[in-house]
Amino acid sequence: MSSAFGEVAVLERCVEILERVLCANDPRTYDTLIPLYAQLDALTSIASDKVRTDEPPPDTSQRGGNDEAADDVVDHEHVKAGAKGVDYDRLVKKFGSNLLRPAHLARIAAISGQTPHLFLRRGLFFSHRDLDDLFDAHERGERFYIFTGRGPSASMHLGHLVPFMFAADLQRRFNAPVVIQISDDEKFFFKGLSLHAAATYAQDNILDIIACGFDPSRTFVFRDTQMIGALYPMVCEIQRKLTVGQIANTFGVRVQSRDGEPTDCLGKLLYPAVQMAPAFAAGLPAELFGGGGEGGGRRRAGSPPRPSRVPLGLDQDPNFSVVRNLAA
């Protein structure tokens, strides 16, 4: 075990030095680092497997053989790690996504002509859905846009900026439009903030977000409460296809009273469709897509719909795993 971890530590140090020495435009960057990323990924996997093999079986004597108390809790409202930290491999299997592999990083480098972002190289963004299909479409000349967002319930810290820093890099790398949803209505329904407080946080958060370096001509930032008129036709399309049971089960909305507890407010049941709506180009400003009619419900007859790519935390995955099933 010590040998495996020793090799990982040495290789990580080599990669760290090379990343400082080699600039993004140096062709040696890809020839040298991409194979090292693959080797590091393999060695890390071997070391982790060795640890699991050498570990004694867990002591369940104090828990009656039930290991559920140690499980992680990751959903759209809560993230709680077990005693050993979040088991992301287990969550990927549970959510049905796929792990990013060195081959994906190599393909990003080949398509964009730039070294993959540090967040990818270090595994901060580690999971994906249908990324290979998106690469194939991009190489055929089909364009995509990036959709991410922020729930304004406080001032932003560095962790909150991670998806925006990454989205700004994707925009530069692929010349893609970016849509940023500020869900002030969500915080009104789920966190109990007043609409005024949510709007105040939203204005402050937007200043932090635009400082990440987005292209102003290709970026659309909006608050739900201000944009709902344009979004509402798509929201209606989504709401008609969703069921009360789907939303209640996925988001834990109480629709029946139990033991005298009140049911949740109606806004919690209706809101998810609002968050899902910008994942479709219809209803978004046509100018964002070059005025070609793919937004604002004015897509040209016969033209394929523009797909969206959504950089987000795994806890937000339920919002989009539900709507993916409705996309067709």
Image (spheres, rainbow, N blue to C red):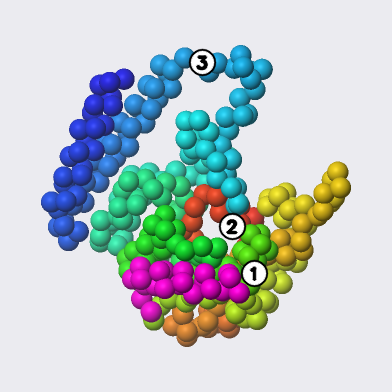
Write down the residue under mark 3: 57
Spatial separation of the CA atoms under disc 3 and disc 2 = 37 Å
Write down the residue under mark 2: 320
Which percent across, then down, holds residue 284?
55, 78
| Residue in the foreground of this view, choosing between 16 and 327 | 16
Q: Amino acid at mark 2?
A: Phe
Nearer mark to the viewer, of 3 and 1: 1
- Label 1 Cα crowd, 10 Å radius (few <14 / some 14-19 / many 20+): some
* 153 versus 83 height, above or below: below
Specify the segment rendered in magenta.
196-216
Q: Which numbered disc covers residue 194? A: 1
Q: Which numbered disc covers residue 32? A: none
Element assignment for label 2: helix
Element assignment for label 3: loop
* 41 versus 123 height, above or below: above
Which percent across, then down, holds residue 217?
39, 81
| Residue in the foreground of this view, choosing between 290 and 284 | 284
Q: Residue at x 72, y 65 (%)?
A: 267
- Label 2 Cα crowd, 10 Å radius (few <14 / some 14-19 / many 20+): some
Q: Kindly check if marks 1 and 2 are in contact, taking CB atoms under 8 A apart as contact.
A: no
Residue 210 is covered by the magenta coloring:
yes
Toward which corner of the image does residue 14 lie, by quadrant? Answer: top left
